[in-house]
Structures are given as C-alpha cells and as structure tokens.
Image (cartoon, helix red, strand yellow):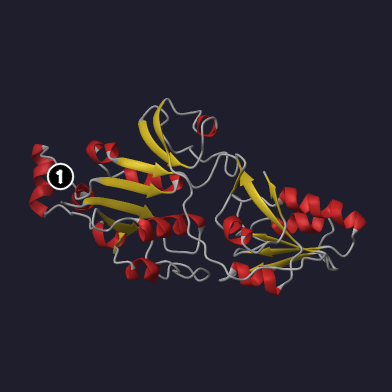
Amino acid sequence: MQRVKILFVISEFYQSGANRYTYEIDKSINKDLIQLDILAWHPLNNSSVWDDFYYQKHKDLGAKIYFLDEIDKITNPTLKQRIDFKLFKKPLPNERLNYQNFMDEYDKIIIVGEYMYPYVQRWMTDKQRAKTFISIHNSIFQHPENYNKFNKKEEYRFISSFEEGMFQNELKEFENYTHYFFPLSINITNTIFKSDYSLTKPIKIGIFTRLSFTKPLDPFLYALQSICEKYPSAQLHIYGNGDPVKEGVMRIVEQLDLKDNVFFRGHQDDLIHSALEDNLNLIWLHGYYGVPGGFAGFDICTTKIPQVLGF
C-alpha cells in the first residue's frame, strides 16, 4: 500500500505549544501508512534565545525535514526570456516553480499555526490550497487581529480542538469554511509529584507561559495585587522566555507596585522539576473557551499542585 504523504509546515523547532503538537503527532502516527515530512519556514539557529528543541526529536523519529531556503529557489529568467518579454510580451518563467513543484508532491498539507497561512499560501496554486489544512494554535481571545491577513470570502479547512459553539465564534468572520475537530493528544509520563501538601510562606504562585502579547498576563497581575492586600509577601513566579520590559509586562508590574512580588524565572527545560523544586503552592493557567492555552497546563497537572484556570 502506498503511504499517504503529508507535509507539516511549521515556523521553526522552538519549544512551543505548536511544536509540541507537531511532535506528539509525529510520535504517534503509523509510519507504515503515513509519510510525514516537515517544512520549517526559518533556518536552524535562527534565534539567540530559543534552541531548536524539537529538531533532533523529529530526526530521531525518521521525519524528513526541509527548510524554506532550500526548496524556494527562485527561477530567474534568462537574458533572452527578458528580451522576449519586453519586445514580444512572452510570459516570464514561473519564479516560484521549485516551491510549487515541492508542494505538488504531497497529498495533504497541514499548516501548524494560523499565523503561518498568509505567508505559505501566497505562492501556492489553487490545487495546492485545496489540499491545505490550517491547524489553529492561537485564538481571537489572545490576538483579536489573528485573521486580518485572510481573505474571508475564500474557502478554508481549519483544524482545532474547539468544540461546537467555540469554533463558530472563533471563525465568525469567515463565509466559507470546514472545521475538523482534533482533540489535543499528548502522552505524559510522570512519576514525581507533590505529596503531603501544606501551605508554606511566603505563598508562591507559578505560571508557565512565554512572555508575549498573545498571552496577556494582566488579569493575573491584578489578581496578585488583590492577594497581596491580605498576604503582602505573596510571590508570583513567571516561567517562560521573553523580555518583560519589551513585552510590556514590567510596565504593569510597576504600575501595580508589585516589583518585590513578581519574579521572572525564564525558560525551563523541565516544568515539573521546576514546580516541585521551587515548592509552588498554586499554579495559574491561562486559557480560552474553557481549555488551557498551552500544553504546560497538562504537564503540570501531574504534580498534584492545586491549579486555577483563568480565561
């Protein structure tokens, strides 16, 4: 039996929810039935902050990995072709032919992250767009301008874990789309957890999220301010990459006079170990449509530390 060829288009291999999603699928599919290849939009070592965490993991699973700068070789017209175009209006060669030939090789194309679609589709043929699916990984609650670059009248095929009622709200601006429900599917194995729970002081609350305008922390900082009215020494530990000044988080911290209560801990390779090692009393999770807004929430569930989901 000939295997179905599926191409996953991702932004890069950083340790993010979208890439965790891709890896979990790559790890779980039947490779006898499906050939899963990956096209990364950015090259390796593209960031001075983030490591390409999932690159080797996909390689170990046998995935073929391509990069945009390898497959998008521009076809430049010859001198004769330029002259013929100028004098006789003969069309120039398709400069994106290599890109389109590459996309033609696949039965299905899945773009991991709706934010990627406007860039990926602009060089596609109509036939290629018709076999393309868009996996949603943000939400209009995180980023109200999420779909500004989409032509709302075109036909789309979306994939998400949003259930009935949720995806209609998410995609309310679109006139013609099909939505495919795909539940979040991850495998978590954890043998360590917090036992004999007791409230320690200072009260230590943790939130695991990268600092980004798509993951606003304002509600949590206001909640911390309220808590500090009763427990002045309460602490909020924020685990995740990002510059708190550049992302505007520090401005709110200073406005609420919480400089002595908020700690930016940076990226953590092992979320579970960090939560237990730092003896957190409570975990805060952000979310939308009533579900956690990242895979970290599911990993942290195994620690048995109490959690509150805010959305």
Q: Residue at x 81, y 66 (%)?
A: 198
Residue 11 visible at all = no
Residue type, numbered disc 1? Leu
Horizontal side of residue 280 vs 143, given as left or right: right
Q: Is residue 211 left or right of residue 106?
A: right
Q: Residue at x 35, y 53 (%)?
A: 9
Is 253 rendered above or below residue 139? below
Q: Position of residue 284 (x, y in %)?
A: 70, 55
Among the 4 quarters of the image, the one containing residue 142: top right
Q: Residue 256: percent from the left, percent from the top?
A: 83, 54
Q: Secondary structure at mark 1?
A: loop
Vertical relation: 299 (above or below) 106: below
Camera-side residue of 238 and 81: 238
Residue 25 sits above or below residue 61 on the image? above
Q: In the image, what residue occupies the spot 48% across and 37% down? A: 148
Judge whether residue 47 can be spotted in this image: yes
Residue position for label 1: 92
Residue that lies at the very extreme toward the right in this rendered image: 230
Q: What is the crowding at mark 1: few (fewer than 14 residues within 10 Å), some, or many (at least 20)?
A: some
Q: Residue at x 51, y 41 (%)?
A: 146
Query: Where does residue 151 sit, x and y in percent of width and height?
Result: 40, 32
